[in-house]
Image (cartoon, rainbow, N blue to C red):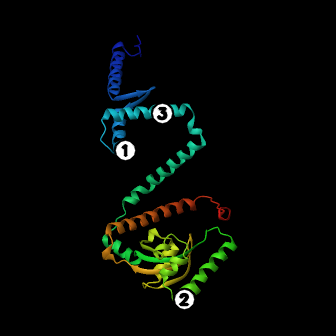
Amino acid sequence: MKKSSKPSVSVWVGLLVAFAAVSAAFAATEVAKVNGKVITLEEFNKKYQALLPLYQNKTPTKQTVLEDIVKRELGVQEAKKQGLEKDPEVQEEINTVLYQALLRKQLQKDFEKISITDTDARAWYNKNPEIRTSHIFVPLAPGASKEEEASAYARIKEIQNKELKSGKSFAEVAQKFSEGVAAPMGGDIDYQGKSQLDPAYYSAALALRTPGKVSGIVRSQFGLHLIKLTAIRPWSEVDPAAIRQEVFNERKQALFDNYMKGLRSRAQVTVKNDLVK
């Protein structure tokens, strides 16, 4: 007689008991359920640790955080019901989050490897010191017409050739003829670092080397300048930690630029700069 291949009753009972045990264990780890969406204890613990830094005033109870997670889930589900992910403004916000997430995933480890010593900071500072300058300023927008540009240059050349050569001090001429906010202070803008000044302005001022010297006409993104180098702050008077941060930011920017350069080299990009002047 051929034996039946069907599981016996005892086997079925065993399976049901095992399934019930697994279900019970799983249910024991459910900290919440929102419209069928289960939030497990493991998920909660991860989110709890991630959310803690956002609570600045005081450490919340776990019940408070769980309630916030439930509210978030309710909101996300409702947003999906309304199809908000198809809204153009929401899509743009999503793209911003994706862009930031990409940079974090691809570059964060490289950023964490950056190490700046005091020796590194001092070597960088010797090439890029904080400088004190005064300037005589004539505004000129980047997209100015040829007529506006000619007028601005004529104005600053007149100040340069007539007023500065008349024997008046730089501060006196700046007070009377400069169109910048520093004019009442004789054009003095105090000490500024490389990251605080327009690149063209900083390079021209640093190139003077000797305090007291005055530059020729310098074009920056803001307009036209005649720059007087007043002083160069020595290393002994700066905060090394602040300079290390400057070097860190510069190296971080270099990593970012290199990464984006790689993406661009593998893409097809067309840019028409003349249309956005």
- Gap between marks 1 and 2 measured at Cα: 61 Å
The mark lying in front, picked from 3 and 2, is 2
Give the Cα distance between marks 1 and 3.
19 Å
Instruction: Please state which of residues 261 and 252 is positioned toward the viewer in this rendering.
Output: 252
x%, y% of residue 274?
67, 65
Identify the disc placed on residue 54: 1
Q: What amino acid is at disc 2?
A: Ser
Residue density around tag 3, few if under 14, some if 14–19, many if 20 or more, within 10 Å: few
Tag 1's secondary structure?
Answer: helix
Q: Quadrant of residue 239?
A: bottom left
Spatial CA distance of label 3 from label 2 is 72 Å
- Structural crowding at the residue carrying mark 2, measured as other residues with C-alpha within 10 Å and reported as few (<14), some (14–19) or many (≥20): few
Q: Nearer the viewer, residue 90 or 59?
A: 59
Residue 145 is labelled as: none
Relative vertical location of residue 184 with respect to residue 42 in this rendering, above or below: below
* Amino acid carrying mark 3 in the image: Gly
Question: Which of labels 1 and 2 is toward the front?
Answer: 2
Checking the image for residue 75, the label placed there is 3
The residue under label 2 is 166
Task: Label 3, secondary structure: give it.
Answer: helix
Along the polypeptide, which appears first: circle 1 or circle 2?
Answer: 1
* Picture layout, residue 269 above or below residue 62: below
Left/right placement of residue 123 relative to residue 199 reads left
> Do tag 1 and tag 3 residues touch (Cβ < 8 Å)?
no
Closer to the camera, 200 or 92?
A: 200
In this rendering, does residue 225 appear at all? no
Instruction: Describe residue 117's horizontal placement relative to residue 141 as left or right.
Output: left
